[in-house]
Amino acid sequence: VPSGGYRLAFDDDAAWLEQLRSAVDRRLLELLPSGAAGPARLLEAARYALLSPGKRFRPLITLLAVREFGGDSTLALDAACAFEMVHAASLILDDLPSMDDAQTRRGRPTTHRQFDEATAILAAVGLLNRAFGVIAEDERLSSAVKAELTRRLSDAVGFAGLVSGQALDLGARDQTRTPAEMELLNHRKTGVLIAGAAEAGALIAQAPPEAVAAMGRFAVHLGMAFQIHDDLLDVEGGLDLGKDLGQDEGMTTMVSALGVGGAEAAMEAHLAAAETALVDVGARGLLARY
Ligand code: GRG
């Protein structure tokens, strides 16, 4: 988050981060069923959505959290991929005509435009389901860890997570939202899944419960800062021709709710809280001031 006076410490090692991202992409592809397992068009749509060029922020945060607690990152690769599968499913659904009616995603036609709406819905449900299967099948993790991961992933998707955030987002779009309403919405749409991904890394590294909780707090605040930063860039960038097209225009954002100064202050507060969570757990390697 360049304007916040913080950076993610692992940005220092761009080549290493890129290697990690490639490892995630290779594994995502391996974890999808091959052609014989389902209709080719459905699997093609799932691959299209899952492997299109995104940041892979959620799996990377899982892998970095494992490293932070001295664990073996390779043990967490499949769980990290499960979080990206849920994220990809949520993006497919978010883009549908009945939701954001988005034309492009990650610079490409949205899945329902590239294929068709029914195929996109089925690909999303397939990816969501596969995420839980990937965790269940992981023989390197203990049953206790797998049960915890399943619970956290389920919470992140469910009625206090993505589906709830999306329902809040879709409701009364023409009305102005308060900053508190925006915080709740962003927390559920963005914060909860990122927190689950970070907690998953700490759990797999067998970090103590306080450390797992602190990683979750770190990631929630980082995710919220990231969301506000995105809103600020939209305003600062004016007409951004590279932006994916949807029906978001005119909706409340943290910037419209708080003004630019207020949104910057809220972002700073989230970054400071993220840093505090790391200090709490002695895991300062992830976030650095510059
Ligand atoms: C059943 C999984 C499921 C979801 C149903 C549709 C829905 C409920 C939720 C949508 C949630 C959503 C789209 C939240 C937006 C989160 C967000 C910040 C997306 C952008 O994330 P980035 O910047 O994107 O990490 P990339 O493309 O880099 O992955």
Image (cartoon, grey):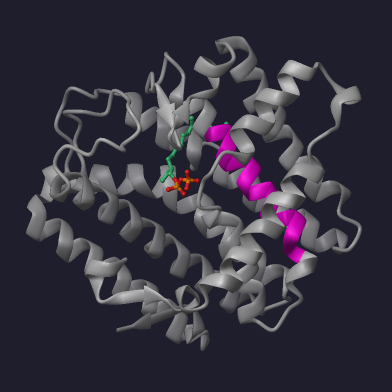
Q: Does the magenta stretch include residue 79?
A: yes
Magenta region's main secondary structure?
helix
Instruction: Please indicate whether residue 59 sits to the left or right of residue 1 in the image.
Output: right
Q: Which residue is drawn at 53% across and 34% down?
A: 90
Q: Nearer the viewer, residue 208 or 198?
A: 198
Q: Nearer the viewer, residue 281 or 267?
A: 267
Q: Which residue is drawn at 58% across and 78% down?
A: 211
Q: Which residue is drawn at 61% across and 10% down?
A: 118
Displayed quadrant of residue 247: top left
Above or below residue 228? Residue 89 is: above
User: Which range is magenta?
Assistant: 76-90
User: Image quadrant for the C terminus?
Assistant: bottom left
Above or below residue 177? Residue 290 is: below
Displayed quadrant of residue 207: bottom right
Labels in figure, total: 0
Above or below residue 70? Residue 130 is: above
Residue closest to the far bottom: 282
In the rendered image, residue 36, in percent from the top left (x then y), is placed at 91, 23
Q: Nearer the viewer, residue 111 or 137?
A: 111
Displayed quadrant of residue 117: top right
In the rendered image, residue 246, in percent from the top left (x then y), is placed at 32, 25
Instruction: Please indicate whether residue 24 sits to the left or right of residue 220 in the image.
Output: right
Instruction: Please indicate whether residue 251 sits to the left or right of residue 212 in the image.
Output: left
Instruction: Please indicate whether residue 108 sits to the left or right of residue 170 in the image.
Output: right
In the rendered image, residue 155, in percent from the top left (x then y), is placed at 59, 46
In the rendered image, residue 68, in percent from the top left (x then y), is placed at 61, 80
User: Image quadrant for the N terminus?
Assistant: bottom left
Q: Does the magenta stretch include residue 126?
A: no
